Image (cartoon, rainbow, N blue to C red):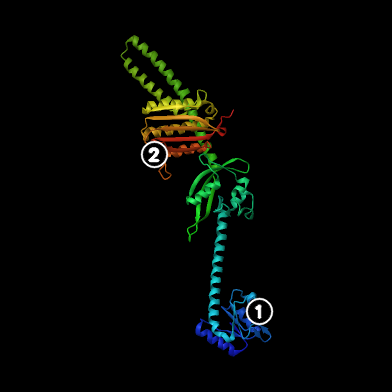
Amino acid sequence: MYLEDDANDAELARHELLRTAKIRDWRPVSTREAFAKTLSARTPDLILSDYSLPNFDGREALLMARALCPSVPFIFVSGKLGEELAIETLKLGATDYVLKRGLSRLSPAVNRAIAEAESIRSRTEAQAALASQGALLTRIIDAIPDVIYAINTEGRLTVANRALLQVLESSADAVLGHRLAEFGNFAKVPAGDRSGAEADEDMDLMRSRRAVTEREVRWLDREQKQCWHLQSKLPLVDPASQAVTGLVTVSRDVTQSRMHEREVLEITEREQRRIGSDLHDGLGQELTGLGLMIQALEKELQREKSPHLAQLHKIGEVLQSAFASARSVARALAPINLDQGGLESALEQLAQHCTELFGIDCKFQGAPPPAATLSDSASTHLYRIAQEAMVNAAKHARPRHITVSLQEVGADLELTIVDDGTGFDPLPHAPKGMGLKTMAYRARMLNGSLSVTRVAGGGTRVQCRLPILSNQRRP
């Protein structure tokens, strides 16, 4: 659109533009009413305007255009425009100005203005699309009950979903730009074998570009009660420069699940101990009484020189075998008797049994004082871990020696099983059997940790470490 009251000047400008610029539609107007009507009917791609008009000037036209279509380029084409006035129009929002005596500049000015407007429009649309996607992403992560947040390379929060804000009891404005360590109600307890500050770990993950997937960690909630979370961390990489720009963390609260699992496992262990005790005290005593009766009958048949003596002797041997099997099953179901030596005695018997069963030199080194204070459940878990580790070593590593030790390390109790066998592959991607997973699970149930490492010179070390205080036997 061209606002010009002189038809000759309008035609000269049109001729110049048709020669060098791409003009699809030319709409000349000469009055204020026609200018306003044209702007209201259809937004033009470009506005050209003379500055001096009867009863209407270019400054007023510029203000009207900026109010109705602020993104449309506006170029003054004037016969005379002083420097001060030109600067004023540019400050008011004009894109450029061209003098009528120099129309050769009109086409370049128009082409440049249209290109700049298109670039600005493209950026605006892209920013609007990004803002829309960002709003959608914010709604999505706010709807997820897991704690989700992202930090930049300085460790400051850039994203915090609703779940995290609820934990921090704060607003997004008060959280973003700060470090998590600044919030006291987000304290974290290192889980067993984890060491070092959380911030240091995050920085290391960003430097190494490593990811962490569903690692279990323990936190203290607002009431200082322990809770469990499955945590995953992934470095954020800029697709253009491939530079690491931050780290995103997703943390799922599995406290209730872990508590239920622990309760089910403890109920199972108690039921096994009850069945084991019933076998030992019930069936075992009955088999013992039956054995004594057979011995008395055998003596009677010996005096009578009965031909049934040999058959009765075989019955006695079968009974002895059944009694041994019942004792073995009872010991497996209820391996620990806290009234008869507790965990230390059970581990010592386990070592002796391993020696007899596999022909391997198995030894136990105990530390009675701390172990004697453990609860039935904790003692049974430790026994099962030692049993699994020793059986695995005996069956798969072909060791000559296995050593089981139990010792107090600060406020923790440490169970260690070391063998001198062929070892194993400790790398994270190595396949893990159910035995190792079960041992790790039992360790977690005790608020402890399990590590499996190579021994220098060959062999394997299985180590379970747990806090004594939270696993003590209650009076």
Q: Is residue 158 above or below residue 1?
A: above
Give the SS element for disc 1: helix
Answer with the quarter of the image where residue 259 lies: top right
Residue 342, how many percent across, how many down? Answer: 50, 26
Q: Measured from the top left, where is residue 228 in percent x and y?
A: 55, 42
Disc nearest the viewer among 1 and 2: 1
Q: How crowded is mark 2: few (under 14 residues within 10 Å), some or many (20 or more)?
A: some
Residue furthest out toward the top = 303
**Which label number is shown at residue 84?**
1
Residue 330 appears in the picture as rendered = no
Q: Which of marks 1 and 2 is nearer the N terminus?
A: 1
Single out the residue that lies furthest toward the bottom. 8
Depth check: 465 or 87 in front? 87
Residue highlighted by disc 2: 424
Q: Residue farthest to the left?
A: 307
**Tag 2 secondary structure:** loop
Name the foreground residue: 171 vs 155. 155
